[in-house]
Amino acid sequence: MKNCLCTLSALAIATTLSFGQEAPKPPGGGGKHKRPNPEEMFKKLDTNQDSGVSIEEYKASPRGQKNPAKAEEIFKKIDTNADEKITLEEFKAHRPPPRPRPPGGNPPPPATPPAAVTPPAAVTPPAAVTPPAE
């Protein structure tokens, strides 16, 4: 009975500890947000496929529809040669640089096995009581 109780206690503790481990991250850091490809974004904005995004096309984008005045202001900043069309090169140049990553990306966590679980200390029963002699 005592061995069974110790074994069940050890299994319960081991199970609890195993749920507390972090899930492994995918290779390459596994960030939550991936930067969209500028070429793909440009193609979506250039609805008439004339290799340039006009102010009307830019304002028709979800971001432009949200705030047309801000969209026009951003359009003018991106259109550096003021020809009222954004080229792919202007579009790429406007994008902020990617955030710096630590050298080697995010290293995977060390592959160490979980700590060994020791069973709880044995409980000693109280001293045996002998019935009084008659």
Image (tube, rainbow, N blue to C red):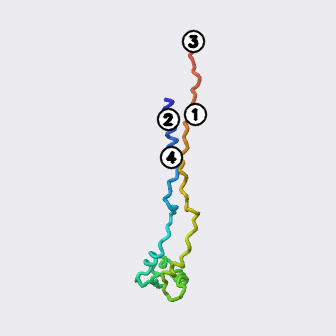
113 lies left or right of 49: right
The image position of residue 43, as x and y in percent, is 43, 78
Amino acid residing under circle 3: Ala
**Left-right relation of 40 to 105:** left
Q: Amino acid at mark 1?
A: Ala
Which residue is labeled 2 in the image? 7
Report the Cα–Cα distance between label 1 and label 2: 12 Å
Residue with the mark numbered 3: 133
Whole-percent x, y for residue 101 in the image: 57, 65
The answer to which of marks 3 and 2 sits earlier in the sequence is 2
Q: What residue lies at 47% left-to-right and 78% top-to-bottom?
A: 65
SS label for mark 2: helix
Q: Is there CB contact under 8 Å for labels 3 and 1?
A: no
Any part of residue 115 in sight:
yes
For the residue marked with disc 4, what is the amino acid? Ser
Task: Categorize mark 1 by other alpha carbons within 10 Å: few (<14), some (14-19), many (20+).
Answer: few
Disc 2 residue type (three-letter): Thr
Report which residue position mark 1 lands on. Answer: 121
Whichever of labels 3 and 4 marks the residue nearer the N terminus, that label is 4
C-alpha span from label 1 to label 4: 21 Å
Q: Quadrant of the C terminus?
A: top right
